[in-house]
Amino acid sequence: MDVLGNNKASLSERERRINICRQCPDRNHDRCGLCGCFIKTKTILASSECPVGKWSTGKSSVDDTGRAEKDEKRADDPSQRV
């Protein structure tokens, strides 16, 4: 658990996440309009992920629509299970 274990994302990763959130149309001031989390806190925690996949703990890139093109397999997608 990141909060209790003080497991934080690197400063460069936090800045990258914050910049993505600042441009998101779902942002509601200092909170994510989708999950309700405080953006500053959510972006600090190493294991946090954007609810629509714009950033995550794995490598991803944002496409022209603002959606993520993930390099990793999704555990919640049955077609991606090994």
Image: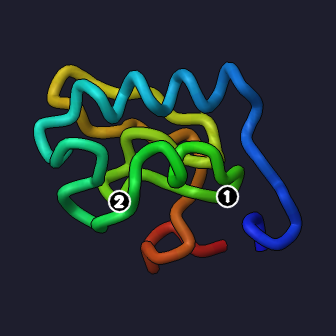
Residue 5 — which label? none
Query: 65 or 40: nearer the eye?
Result: 40
Q: Residue at x 41, y 47 (%)?
A: 39
Crowd rating for badge 1 (residues with CA inside 10 Å; few <14, some 14–19, many 20+): some
Left or right placement of residue 63 versus residue 69 in this view? left
Q: Residue at x 82, y 55 (%)?
A: 7
* Residue matched to label 2: 51
Q: Amino acid at mark 2?
A: Pro
Regarding mark 2 in the picture, which secondary structure is present there? Answer: loop
Residue 47: numbered disc: 1
Q: Position of residue 2 (x, y in %)?
A: 76, 65
- Decide which of 43, 77 is in the foreground and name it: 43
Q: Position of residue 78 (x, y in %)?
A: 45, 79
Marks 1 and 2, how far apart at CA: 12 Å
Report whether 15 appears left or right of 46.
left
Location of residue 65 in the rendering, given as x and y in whole percent from the top left corner: 15, 29
The one of 76 and 26 positioned closer to us in this rendering: 26
- Indicate left or right for 27 with 57 as reference: left
Which residue appears at 29% of the width and 28% of the height?
22
**Side of 37 where 40 appears, left or right:** right
What colour scheme governs how the chains and residues are painted in the rendered image of this protein? rainbow
- Up/down of 7 relative to 20, above or below: below
Residue 31 sits above or below residue 43 on the image: below
Residue type at the position of mark 1: Ser
Q: Is residue 47 above or below residue 63?
A: below
Within-10-Å neighbours for mark 2: few <14, some 14–19, many 20+: few
